[in-house]
Amino acid sequence: MKTVVAALVRRDGKYLTAKRKDDAALGGLWEFPGGKVEDGETEQEALEREIVEEFNTLIAVSKLLANTQINDEIMLKLYACEHKLGAYQLREHSELAWVDNLRQLYGYELAPADVELLEQITKDKRQPALHELVIGDAYKNEDIMRMFLVSGQGGMRKSNRANSLILFALHNTGNPYEDKWDDQGVMHYTGMGLSGDQSIDYAQNKTLAESRTNGVGVHLFESFEPKEYMYRGQVQLVGDPYYERQKDEANNQRQVVKFPLRLSQQ
């Protein structure tokens, strides 16, 4: 069995997580950085090498914190690490984030195996609370984060722990997206990406496009007032996604993905 090692890096009392580039495997998801152990390396040596390659940064590897088996061939191990030297240059990731405590990492969309590691080290046994949702009721962002155990950012948010995709249709001023209901009760929902052409294969666009077969529940919230989100219920894709031209946040024409959605109970 092959071993992949990951680093829980601590610097000045904060912990590191990194977002995978969109064109990488598990693109757009956050992770504990690291990589495969090569022949002739110890696990500690492999992790030190990986962090140099990924960030041009030196760390000190200490104790093993958690492990999880990804499949029949790969074991993932998480090590506690301390920052030594370097400025964390982005080479294989698109973003970095430093959090004050480990539970804040639940607000990031982690890769599934990294969620398992996080649950082990935090001993977090919280469960989603989707049973509290009432169609037609308005919720704050904090309520949605708690019930779905999901990030507090983004218009399309994937909750691995609730196996759900949460969509937000914002109808207040300043929103560049055109999410509208037609006369047949179908919402034509705009995909992810604030500027430039959108792709159906990008991040949660792909999750929504495959929602008829991937088993992920899709939930819709609409907002007519800032910081208030009305729960409309679960929705389903009722046709193939398509492309059209819209203006982006800079008022430039671009290609966007549109998803035809209908409320599930209709």
Image (tube, grey):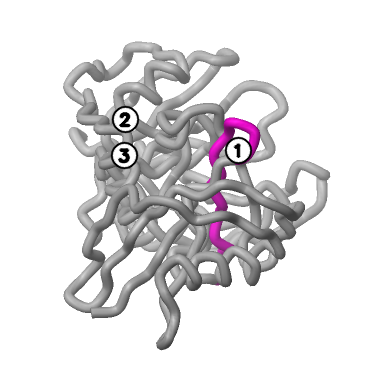
Using the image, determine if residue 102 lies above or below residue 41: above
How much space separates mark 3 and mark 2, taking CA atoms? 20 Å
* Residue type at tag 1: Trp
Query: How many C-alpha atoms fall within 10 Å of the one at disc 2: few (<14), some, or many (≥20)?
Result: many
Q: Position of residue 78 (x, y in %)?
A: 37, 55
* Residue type at tag 2: Phe
Which is more foreground, mark 3 or mark 2? Answer: 3
Q: The N terminus lies in which quarter of the figure?
A: bottom left
Q: Which mark is residue 121?
A: 3
Which residue in the structure is indicated by mark 2? 148
Q: The C terminus lies in which quarter of the figure?
A: top left
Q: Position of residue 120 (x, y in %)?
A: 26, 42
Quadrant of residue 36 in the image? bottom left
Q: Which mark is residue 98?
A: 1
How much space separates mark 1 and mark 3, taking CA atoms? 17 Å
Which of the two labelled residues, at mark 1 and mark 2, occupies the earlier sequence position? 1
The magenta region covers 11-23
Residue 149 shown left or right of residue 170 in the figure: left
Q: Which residue is pictured at 50% across the width and 71% down the height?
A: 45
Provide the secondary structure element on which disc 3 rests.
helix
Tag 1–tag 3 contact (CB < 8 Å): no
